[in-house]
Image (spheres, rainbow, N blue to C red):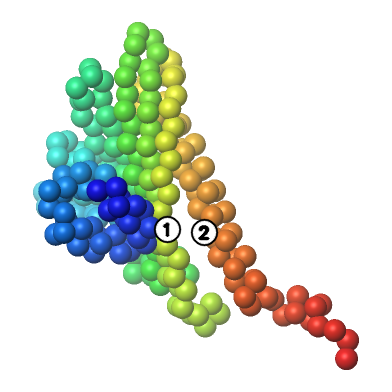
């Protein structure tokens, strides 16, 4: 099981579904653990009754709510836990591909999948919030200026905070998620985009830099 989880952490998000399916067939005795611990790119379904889209995941087995923002889809699912508290799952999917709702015209394919799970326990006027966030990023370009380029990766972080409940749980959870997404976005920018840019510039330095290094003839 430990080896399987280590493998899934190194698989690009676009291939995680295929890899997870293979692991489930190889390790059927660990299927429940794999399905609960491995995060996959989010899928969107449409409610046949009201015609609205919502995000499909393991957390939406009871009630759900959803809203829209600039081509993205988000869903929120909440349930009570065994410790007299509750758990909330906030899911956000942004499709930035040419054919997606949030198309910008720059990406052939692109997706931002964010999963935020918060465990809440309240003691009198103070609540303890335990947030686990996962962000999966995948993008592909295919044009004359950049050629064909694919970049994908995922990152997971945790945050624990004790906050007063005077303003309500939703305000506290919203601030934590915003702060966490900002940190994850910066980490992705530094780890994936920064390292990729460094590697490309090392392998294929800009023409200005090459001219500076060439010796005088």
Relative to 142, residue 194 above or below: above
The answer to whether 209 is drawn above or below residue 50 in the figure is below
Q: Residues within 10 Å of mark 1 (few under 14, many from 20)?
A: some
Q: Could you tell whether 192 is left or right of 12 in the image?
A: right
Disc 2 to disc 1: CB gap under 8 Å: yes
Q: Is residue 216 left or right of residue 94?
A: right
Rendering coords of residue 127 (x, y %): 37, 17
Please give the name of the residue rendered at 26% of the width and 20% of the height, measured from the top-left corner: 85
Residue 102 shows up from this direction: no
Disc 2 target residue: 192
In this rendering, the answer to whether 183 lies above or below 111 is above
Toward which corner of the image does residue 206 lie, by quadrant? bottom right
Total marks drawn?
2
Local packing at callout 2 (Cα closer than 10 Å; few below 14, some 14-19, many 20+) is some
Q: Residue furthest top?
A: 124
Q: In x, y percent, where is residue 3?
A: 30, 52
Q: Residue at x 24, y 48 (%)?
A: 1
Q: Position of residue 145 (x, y in %)?
A: 55, 79
Q: Secondary structure at mark 1?
A: strand
Q: Residue at x 31, y 28 (%)?
A: 119
Residue at x 64% of width, y 71% of height: 201
Label 2: element kind: helix
Q: Which residue is mark 1?
A: 153
**Lower position in the chain sequence, tag 2 or tag 1:** 1
Q: Nearer the viewer, residue 21 or 1?
A: 1
């Amino acid at each position: 099981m430990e080896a399987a989880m280590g493998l899934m952490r190194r698989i690009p998000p676009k291939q995680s579904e295929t890899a997870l399916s293979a692991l489930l067939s190889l390790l059927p005795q660990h299927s429940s653990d794999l399905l609960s611990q491995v995060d996959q790119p989010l899928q969107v379904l449409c409610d046949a009754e009201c015609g609205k889209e919502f995000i499909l995941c393991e957390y939406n087995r009871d009630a759900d709510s959803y809203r829209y923002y600039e081509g993205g889809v988000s869903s929120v699912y909440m349930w009570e836990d065994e410790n007299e508290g509750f758990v909330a799952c906030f899911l956000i999917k942004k499709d930035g591909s040419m054919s997606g709702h949030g198309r910008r015209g720059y990406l052939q394919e692109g997706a931002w999948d964010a999963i935020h799970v918060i465990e809440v326990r309240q003691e009198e006027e103070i609540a303890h919030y335990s947030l686990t966030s996962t962000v999966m990023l995948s993008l592909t370009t295919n044009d004359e200026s950049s050629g064909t380029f694919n970049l994908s990766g995922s990152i997971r972080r945790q945050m624990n905070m004790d906050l007063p409940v005077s303003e309500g749980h939703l305000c506290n959870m919203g601030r934590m998620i915003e702060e966490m997404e900002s940190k994850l976005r910066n980490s992705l920018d530094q780890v994936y985009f920064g390292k990729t840019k460094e590697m490309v510039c090392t392998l294929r330095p800009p023409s200005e830099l090459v001219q500076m290094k060439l010796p005088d003839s």
